[in-house]
């Protein structure tokens, strides 16, 4: 019984590390050329709390000069607003635009994938240990 309680405590501790403490949505905040920190090492950039009814956004513009990656808090309509700025005469292209509404969700998809898998793996380790020692 003590082992089961200890395993539940470990599981809840690991789970709590992935749950935000505040109710404000937090997003990454950066804008720069592709290949820089905003693109390759997003976990090291600034984070900001969104105002109510805002979402996290990541969009990518490309033109003759290069590619710009943008991450921030924005109104839900931001992707529609960005698409409205497309002008074939300027050779500027919106390569990607996506909004989301969970903490730090405007990172590269692989980052959230690893966090999710780490949580699932810790759950199964707890189950295994419970069967082994319980």
Image: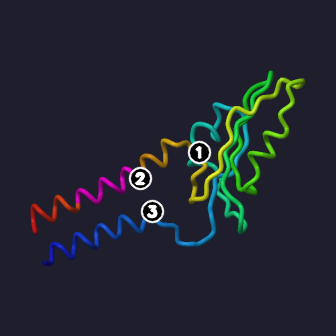
The residue at the point 21 percent across, 76 percent down is 5
User: Which contiguous range is marked in magenta?
Assistant: 115-125
> Where, by quadrant of the figure, is residue 87 drawn?
top right
Contact? badges 1 and 3 (CB < 8 Å): no
**In this rendering, position of residue 31 left or right of residue 17:** right
Answer few, some or many: residues within 10 Å of disc 1's Cα (few below 14, many 20 plus, some between 14 and 19): many
**Residue mark closest to the camera, 1 vs 3:** 3
Answer few, some or many: residues within 10 Å of disc 2's Cα (few below 14, many 20 plus, some between 14 and 19): few
The residue at the point 53 percent across, 72 percent down is 21
Question: Disc 2 designates what residue?
Answer: 116
Q: Earlier in the sequence, mark 3 or mark 2?
A: 3
Q: Residue furthest left?
A: 133
Question: Disc 3 designates what residue?
Answer: 18
Q: Secondary structure at mark 3?
A: loop
Q: Nearer the viewer, residue 104 or 78?
A: 78
Residue 101, given in percent of the width and then of the height, sits at 61, 58
**In this rendering, position of residue 65 left or right of residue 37:** right
């Amino acid at each position: 019984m003590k082992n089961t309680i200890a395993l539940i405590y470990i599981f809840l501790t690991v789970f709590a590390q992935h749950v935000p403490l505040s109710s404000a949505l937090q997003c990454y905040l950066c804008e720069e050329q592709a290949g820089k920190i905003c693109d390759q090492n997003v976990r090291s950039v600034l984070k900001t709390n969104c105002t109510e009814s805002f979402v996290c956004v990541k969009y990518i513009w490309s033109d003759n000069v290069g590619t710009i990656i943008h991450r921030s808090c924005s109104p839900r309509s931001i992707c529609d607003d960005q698409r409205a700025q497309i002008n074939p005469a300027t050779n500027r292209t919106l390569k990607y635009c996506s909004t989301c509404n969970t903490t730090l969700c405007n990172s590269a998809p692989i980052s959230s994938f690893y966090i999710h898998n780490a949580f699932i793996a810790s759950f199964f380790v707890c189950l295994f240990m419970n069967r082994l020692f319980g």
